[in-house]
Structures are given as structure tokens and as C-alpha cells.
Image (cartoon, grey):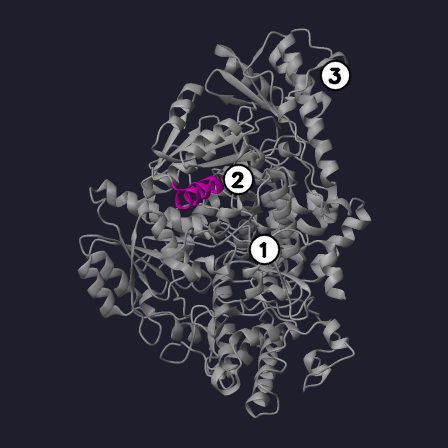
Amino acid sequence: MNTESLEQLENPSEFVARHIGITPDDEQKMLAVIGEKSRQSLIDSIVPRSIARQSEMKLPPAISEADALSELKQMAGKNKLLKSFIGQGYYPNHLPGVILRNVLENPGWYTSYTPYQAEISQGRMEALLNFQTMVADLTGMDIANASMLDEATAAAEAMTLAKRSVKAKGDVIVVSGDAHPQTIEVMQTRAAPLGLTVKLANSAEEWDAAIAADDYFAALIQYPCSSGWLMDWSGEANKIHAKNAAVIMASDLLALTLLKSPGEMGADIVVGNSQRFGMPMGAGGPHAAFMACKDAFKRSLPGRLVGVSVDVHGKPAYRLALQTREQHIRREKATSNICTAQALPAIIASMYAVYHGPAGLKRIAERVTRLVSIFTAGMQSMGFTAMHADSGFDTVSFKTDGATDTIAARAVQMGANLRKAWDVYLCVSLDETSTRADVELLWSIFGDGKKLPDFAALEGSAPALIPAALRRTSAFMTHPVFNTHHSETAMLRYIRQLSDKDLALDRSMIPLGSCTMKLNATSEMIPITWPEFGNVHPFAPADQQAGYAELDQQLRAWLSSITGYADVSLQPNAGSQGEYAGLLAIRAWHAARGESHRDVCLIPSSAHGTNPASAMMVGLKVVVTKCDEAGNVDLEDLKAKCAQHADQLACIMITYPSTHGVFETQVKEVCEVVHQHGGRVYLDGANLNAMVGVAAPGEFGGDVSHLNLHKTFCIPHGGGGPGVGPVCVVEDLVPYLPGHATAGDVRKIGAVSAAPYGNASVLPITWMYIRMMGAAGLTRATEVAILSANYISKRLKDHYPTLYASANGHVAHECILDLRDLKETSGVMAEDVAKRLADYGFHAPTLSFPVANTLMVEPTESEPLAEIDRFIDAMIAIRAEIRRVEQGEWPQDDNPLKNAPHTADSLLAADWPHPYAREVGAALAGRVPGSVKYWPPVGRVDNVYGDRNLFCSCVPLDAYADAAT
């Protein structure tokens, strides 16, 4: 007879064992290798008792996957789904099913990592190159990057790009008052710490006066304007250029299929959002913004840039170009702290463009503007006055004087949302999903019982809204990729062809240190495509977003309990933005106490490069502190620097566990020293995967932390974004969390992201993870992550010593393998091992960070022991290959590592000039029976060639033909 209780049979914590890949039996085997008796004894020997968690995490108990989905569905149902005519940069759209099922819902795409390892990322980089080409073509600019976080932060980045790129010496940026309000707000937030001034021009007279002045370095124009009207800005661009200032245009990709491009008007930088190319509104994100610029600005362009180079066989190959701009290299000299993008939404936008092609996109745009013209004509026949009746694309604004609130309220009663602007106008935006019935509904809302216009009569007589002089005549998206895959069969195969080229978490372990690549469970991912979350406009009335408000409140409470902080803001839509928001809070706190002069930020030499970059963006001066030989903060140097800068000390930024993968025993003392000198402690939460349940930064001295929900809390990386970077603060810093005046939340700090909840539609992923794990499950996950890292370190110690460890030889949740001596004995570099791992079917660990010529490995708690052992076996096999080079059996310049990765074409070539067998090159020995061999699609990519011959758009097909011959 079964003696288990009903509760045991119900198994509410079933998900914990599905998320954690290590079984109890596995655990005992691993502990034996490490030399510890229990998981608890291991943790006690690694996590300093001085920082051990003092209070339990106040989280609801774990529940099953089915129950969690049911509970979340009820919460989602509290959102009200009204027809959105709000516009303001966010639009309903139709994502083709072939892209929904095969990209957005496909782990082959959403579990991949940022494409730093070019040879195993060719598929997603081709998709991102398509995005760049689409954006460059539509904007009429020379070059575009691989996506930005949102339109508002892209505009802020354009502001600083212009400032460092033009001859004008002023500190003012002129901004059209008819830009999207959230864009204006984020620009104001970002400008202030840099000593820049945003000058709003709310009328033609104010605009003319502003651009006639000599105090500005750039001007930003919304095109089409937020309220809908159009004009040719060429003459204004000439006036701005005469002042040696830059022209920034915030534009709409769908509109640009019909409109004269910004590049043809003289724009220097163009920003915008690709949301309407297939991504749900999702209460604000994630959506792929973009930035494009003229050729002269390209080497200062922020964000990632996919470029084209060649591999060792002369075949075209994609890579991330100009990587010296990345923040971990440039540090305080970085021009931006943006190290995350919105890669997955950018890929979806590019696939949307590939599927529809230029003709299909133009047809969608023509239909939208035709509906708007019919709607406008009908409104005028009913006596309403349009702000600009003679020009527009998808938006039109009507003066409603004292009836504004009445009509807006009537719209809600009839199931629709309109946008109020300047108190006396109502703006109406139509989109891809709009219908004839929607136009008639809008007439009913405004008409309030009046006889409605005759749609059929107006259809043939309504005047076109786009003036002839503004009609686009230039071609766009002429490359075959946008003109080939229009049937579902062709599109399906194109998507599959690209995904087959890549290594993602659905194929094998991604052992990256610093960038946790843990399981993104399917049950966590299901809610992101629920219409109750996806079809909510970020600026819909608050009472229509009750589900999101509850989600926000619960997650903030849970994350506060997990971290030991008083409150959290989920608005930052990347870790870099969370850092920025946290430092803004510290600066504002000092200013409120009359100590604005405190502007020194101490940063250990080992810190991640976004730390000094973020510090510079909020106007702090970076002072680097030393680390000792063990990689710990040099306490004596820290004390000296604190004393030296006592009157100016604002804060210290530290990562814990350290960037070297070790729990530093003196972290509390570090915090105390900084506090004694009047500074605050910013504790980077990038490595929280090693602390959840065992230590809380808010308890042991941290004042501010940002978290990476796309690391510790299971939001997938998606090829380099989306992400969420919540900022957590102690009690006295809560008043300085970011607000969002555009959404009615006025605080001491303005918006840091375009939408009030940031990347809201991926927050359900983290909610599901925490809800299904519970406090005990989360704690066990942390402990198993530490267990797995120590197991790898111990098993590989005779082959690759671990560079940094605690006094007892243990590490935290990641370990740095030291390969530096191999250069002398064999000529082999860490990069060679990284490339060789691709032949064995693995993504490389983190390469040369934080120490050059090392590999940082993080297994995560989700990997089963068999996969961890497979990775270890591959690393040992590679070390044996290196030994054959050391012994002179293979030359230092011609061996499996230097020639890695090996493509199938190279292995099948008639000529095989190498001193090792083809099967050795293919790494076929020791493969697990039944496993599928991964074949890298290209050989090693030539980085130098790619930077010297910068090419960042779709490759002509004849380039592949030339390579083949």
C-alpha cells in the first residue's frame, strides 16, 4: 500500500526537479569529487558566514506548472483589452503564424546567446544583418545597428552620439514638442547628469527661434510627428547643418515605405522602433528599436553592429564588427553603457520584412493611410477640425476643446482607447489590424448619435494624406532575401536553414561565465504570447492594466525579499539601464542632502566594463581601485582611495560574488569603509545566481543593486536581448527610483525607459519561475549551481588550473580556467580552445574576461551531470590535443586547434594538407552514441579583415558564387 500523503502525491514542487538538472545521486558523486560530505557543508565552506542570509525569503510556496499557469491566467484576465487607437509609437499588428511558431516560440531562437562566437552564430547574425539592411534602406542612411532597447533610449543615445560627433560646441539639443512624450522624458532624464539641456520647441515660432540660435549641437524631429502631420524637413536640415549641428529624426518604418526618407532630407541620425513589424505591444516591450546614421558617424555608433568578413576558406561570414567599442574593453572611455540589445524582437521584425517583402509592406502601409484618409474626411463632414487635415500617415488629431474628456470616456465605454494631447486634442492612430468597422466605430464615438458618414461614398473621394512631394520614389529592400521567401513553405525553410547554423541551449550546454545561460522552461515561456498580456498598450488607462499592476507589485515584493532591499523598480529594460537608474538614485540622494559635489565613483580594476561606462553617464568621475593577486578588492588601497577622496566620494561599484568567481570574505568591511566616508555601495547583481537564498546584498551592506532577470531569473537571452534589469534600493533611496511622468507617475527621477513597466511582457517568465520554485527551490538552485561549478573546477584542475579560488580551493558559481601558460608551450591561445569546442558541439565559455587568455565557465543548476561530464570530457580531449602540439607531433601553426572550427566542406575536400586525420578534425572520437553532430557552417572568421573592410548590410549573392569558385 502506498503510504505517501495526498499532498506528496499532488507534488506541488514538481517543477524544481525539472529545472534543476542534478539528481540526489548525482549530487553525491559530485561531492565525492569535490571532497565535501554534503551540499550544505560545501556552501558553508564557500559563502562567508558573515554574509549568510539572516532572514527567510517571504515567497509563496512552490506550485505545479499547471497551477502556476492557471493562477497567472487569472491575473492576466484582469487586464482589459480595448481596441487601441492610442498610437504614440505602439500599434497592434499581425505576426504571421510561421514566424510566431518558428521564431518567437522556438527555443532554437530564444535560447541562443549574444553572437560573440561568430562561427556558431551565423544564422541569427544573418537575420540581424537583414534587420540592419531593412532599417538602412527605409531610413535612407548609410549604416544601421543591430537594434537598441527602445525608441526613447535610442533617441537619448543619438543625442550623445551627436554631441561627440559634430563641430557645434553648444550644450543644448532642440527637440520638437510634437515628438513622442516618452521620448522627450527619457531624453530629459539622460541629458541632465551630462550637463546638457533639452530645449522644447512647442510651436513653429519657438522652433524657428531655437534653430536660429548658436547654443545647440543637435535637433530632434519626429517624422511623422506624434500628432500625425508631415512636412519636408530638408530646408530645416540645411539651417541646422549651417550651425554645424546634427539632425536627428525619430521615424516610423512602416511610414517610410511610402514617405521620402530621412536620409533624403539630410538627417544625420535616425532612430525609431520596429514594434509594429510583428511584436505585440506587451505594455511596452520588448521591442527592437533602431539607430541608423551617415557614414561619418559609424565608428561611434552605439550598440552592436553585425558585419561581413570572410572565413579561412574565403567564404563570406558574419561577425560582430568593431567590437573594440564594447564596454568591457573601453570601460570609462566607453561612449555608452549599452551592451544589451533587443536581438530576438529585431530578428522577428526582420523576418516580418522578409515574409512580406517591400511590396507587401507597402500594401499594408497604403491600406492604413487610405483608412485614415477616409476616417479624416468623415470626421470633417461631421464638423470636426483636424490639426493638419492635409498631411499624415496613420495618425490624425482633432480639436475637441471642452469635449476632450467626454469623448475619450465615451470611447472607453464603447471599447476603444484614444489619446488625449495638449488638453484640447484627441489623437487617433490606425494600424495594420484596423478595419472598416473600426472607422465606423470611431465615427460613432465622435458623432454621439449624429448621422454617420457614408463609408462607400468617401472611399472613392477622400483626398490622399501624403503630399506628392513627400511620396517616396527611391527603392528599398531590393536584396533577394526580401523578395524570395513569401510563401509559407519558403519562409518556413528559410527560418529552419538559419536556425540549423547556430548553437543554442536547445542543442547543448552553453558554459558561459558571467552571463548565466540557464533553462528557460517552456511553461515559463507560454504566457508571453497570451493576448491578455500582449495586446495591452503601455499608455492605456491604469484601470485597464490591473493585471500588469498586480504582476509588477508581486514581482517587486518577491525580488525585494530575495535581495533584502526595501523596494524595486522593474522599469529598466536591460542590466545597463538598471545600473544607470541605480547610480541616478545615489546622485539624487547626495544632491538632496546638499552634497552634489560628491562625484567620485570607486571601481575595482576587475569590474565589468558597464560599471565605469554607467558611472560616466551619470556624471561621476571614475577612480580605479586595485585588486590583490587573489583577485579580491585590495582593502588597503580602497581605504587609501576613500581617505583621498573623502569629501567627493559618491559610491563604490562592486560585483559580488566577484567578477573572478569568488566570494570575497571581506565584502562587509569594504561596504563599511565606504559608508564611513559618506559613500554608498552599488553592488552589481550580475552574479546573483550564486546568492539567491544563501545571502542577500541588502542585508550585508549593499545600498543599490541591479538584477539581470535574463540571467538569474530565466528570461531567455534571445541572441542578445530582450532583458530586464530591475534596480533594487534600501529604504532611504526608495524616493529616487525612476518614475514615468508620461504615464502619470511623477517622481524625483524621470523615466529611464520608454514604457512605465519597461519590457513588461517578459515579466511573466520570471513570475512563473519564482512561483514554481518557491523559496526552498530557489535556494537549492543556487547551491546546485555552486556545486556544479566546483565539480568542473576539480575535475579539470590537472588539465586547466582554476585561476582564482578561496583559501580552501573552492569557487562560487563559476570558475576561471587558466590557459595563459599554453601560449609558451604550444602556441595555443584560449581563443583556439573556444573555437575547437565548436567541433565538439559546445558553445565556448566566456573568453578572456576578466583576465586575458582565460576561459570563464558557469554550468548553471539546470545542466544534468551527463552534459557537464560531456563538456569536461571535451575539455580534457582538447588538452590531450594540445599535449600533442607540445610534444612536437603537430606543428604549432597547423593543428586541430589552430584550424578550428572544421566545416563539413573542408573535411570533405579532395585536398587535406594537415598532419592530423580528418576524423580528428571533426572531433568524432568519444562522441556519445546516438548524439547528433553539430557542423559549424563557416571556418574561423577573419576579424581584422572585417574591421578594415567594414560592410554591414546583406551580402550580394554573387559574393557566395565567387567564394564557391
Q: Is residue 167 above or below residue 56?
A: above
Q: Is residue 20 visible?
A: no
What percent of the width, then of the height, locates residue 442? 64, 18
Q: Secondary structure at mark 3?
A: helix
Residue wearing tag 1 = 306
What range of the chain is rendered magenta? 153-167
Res 672 → quadrant: bottom left
Label 2 crowd (10 A; few <14 / some 14-19 / many >=20): many
Foreground label between 3 and 1: 1
Image quadrant occupied by the N terminus: bottom right
Q: Is residue 670 above or below residue 618?
A: below
Residue type at mark 3: give it.
Answer: Glu
Who's the residue at 60% across and 23% down the image? 392
Decide which of 789, 615 is in the foreground and name it.
615
Which is nearer the N-term, disc 1 or disc 2? 2
Q: How many marks?
A: 3
Who's the residue at 59% across and 19% down the image? 411
Residue wearing tag 2 = 271
Q: Secondary structure at mark 1?
A: strand
